[in-house]
Every structure is written in C-alpha cells, then in structure tokens.
Image (cartoon, rainbow, N blue to C red):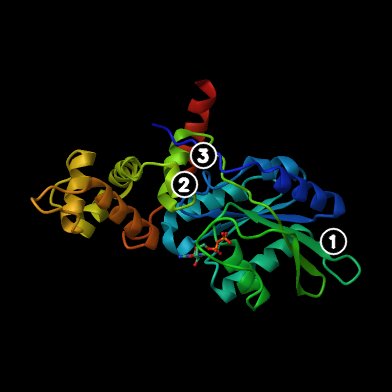
Amino acid sequence: MPIHWFPGHMNSTRQAIKDRVQAGLDVVIELLDARLPGSSSNPLLAALTTGRPSLKVLNKQDLADPAQTEAWLAFYNAQPHTRAIPLDAGDKAPARALIKACRELAPLRGDMHKPLRVLICGIPNVGKSTLINTLVGKKAAKTGDEPGITKLEQKFVLENGFYLFDTPGMLWPRIAVEQSGYNLAASGAIGRNAFDEEEVALELIATLKRRDADRLRQRYGLAELGEDDAVLEAIGVKRGAKIRGGAVQMHKAAEALLMDFRSGLLGRITLETPDEMAAWRHEAAEA
Ligand code: GDP
C-alpha cells in the first residue's frame, strides 16, 4: 500500500517563506538528504522562491554513495541559477564552502550596506539544526531526532554582511511518487506511525538488490539472495529476531534492517538516481 502522510498544514511555513521573500531574499538554501535528494525536496519551496538563486546542499553525504552524490551534484549544477554542494552537517570546514557558494550565487550583495540574505529550508530530520549550529559556532538552534522543533524565524549573522534566516514552521516532505514515500520512510524522515515497517523494509531490500546486492550479502552473511521476504527473514535470523519456537518476528527483522541502513552500518547507499526520479515522476504524471 502506498504511503500517504499528511502531518499537518503548511500554511504558517508558506506564509513565513512569503514574508521572507517580501522582506528581501538573495539566496535560498534547500537542504536535501544526499541518500534521497529528489524525494527529500519540497516543490513548495521552489514555487515560493522562483527566480532566486538556489543552493542545494546534499547533506548526510557521509551516508550516501559518493558516485551517486556526484551524479546528483551534476544534475543540480546543470540547472539555471543553481549550485549544489555535498555536506556533512557537523563538519566545520565544508560548512565554509556553503558560505562561499552563497556569496558566488549573489555576487552583488554581502557587505555592511547590502547584506546577503539567505534562507535555509529543509524537511524535518535532514540536519538543519545541526548545520546551523556548525555555521553559527555555538548551540544556537535546537537539535533533536523528533521532527517539529523550530517555531519562529530566526536570524543569524554568520559574518559581516551575511545573514542566515531559519524558517518557522515545518516544510513537510511531499510524497509525489510512490517510491518517494518508501525512500522517505526508510531514511527516517516521516513519522513511524505513518507506515508499515515491514513493507518499507521489503522495498529497501528490493532497492539494495538492484543497487548493491553484494553489500546486502556481506553484511548479513547471506550466500544467496532469494525473494525479498526470504531475505528479510534471513536478516531476522542473523539479527536475533527469532522468537521461542524458531519463527522470525518479521517486524523486528524490518526494524533491524532499517536501523542498520539509517546508521550507515550497511555502508554508503543512495536510494535513487536523477534518472529514476525523473522516470517515477513521469509515470505518476501519466497515471
Ligand atoms: P533537523 O530536524 O533538520 O533540524 O535535523 P537535526 O539537525 O536535528 O538532525 C537530525 C539527525 O540527523 C540528528 O541525529 C543528527 O545528528 C543527524 N545528522 C545531521 N546531519 C548529519 C550528517 O551530515 N550526517 C550524519 N550522518 N548525520 C547527520
């Protein structure tokens, strides 16, 4: 069953972005999850900030497949008024690259008289608070695993003439195509009550078989990869998800697999390519 998730209205977010555009906005930073850049993007942001230069930050690049990250960077860098950089939100040195890229996107702004006004947006859990903390250099924004903390627009002066604005409200992910729902759920971006972990785990197995079957085999010591549910069952055996009597608790096996993926224990994996994303969107539009 496809995942539908309507966590709440985005009216306050929409208004906050509109207000920022009206008050003055030079560069929009969209924080994306490097493991699922297309699915973690929200088209509302692009719609509300049309014409403004855009910096796509592929965050959590430490968890993503480097070759796929390169492909996504090339994809975004080919778009007009757009630049893309990979990032690991906790790392100080690469965070400097973000400031540099923003300055390059709006070269006429960025001094005491004409400050560079930058808005940072991203779906919950993508790493926005972590990144702001890194950029600001102290515990300035709240961080946590639970989506839904930021309330009011905050302004951070990163250096002379560089203002970073953080949106109040939540930019919830938009599940435009079926596979995006599964990828978002696998990444931990949507509430766990909104999906069936076993179903998401089976989709993840299908993706991993396609993408990196060897890794799946090695991680769980599987000689053969059979049907997806047989693979999940075998993972359950390896990860101690058996109950007394010998049966595997499939939801425990699913939880274990999802945890291994989210924490990077399965290795650096990207769930979607630019071409796949385009094909899924095309299919959804045709349907
Ligand atoms: P927010 O909801 O967008 O503000 O997300 P947070 O900053 O609270 O981060 C959500 C989770 O992702 C936290 O557990 C962070 O430690 C983790 N995280 C953030 N950025 C990165 C990153 O670049 N790499 C990795 N591996 N984890 C990250």
Q: Amino acid at mark 2?
A: Leu
**Mark 3–mark 2 distance (CA, rounded to whole Å):** 11 Å
Label 3 sits on residue: 5
Residue 26 point in image, percent of width and height: 79, 56
Mark 3 is on which residue type? Answer: Trp
**Which image quadrant for residue 44?**
top right
Say whether marks 1 and 2 touch (CB < 8 Å).
no
Q: Which element carries disc 2, helix, strand or loop? A: helix
Label 3 residue SS:
loop
- Circle 3 or circle 1, nearest the eye: 3
At horizontal 33% and vertical 47% (from top left) the residue drawn is: 211
3 or 1: tag closer to the N-terminus? 3
Question: Disc 3 vs disc 2: Cβ atoms closer than 8 Å?
Answer: no
Q: Which residue is mark 1?
A: 108
* Quarter of the view holding residue 8: top right
Residue at label 2? 184
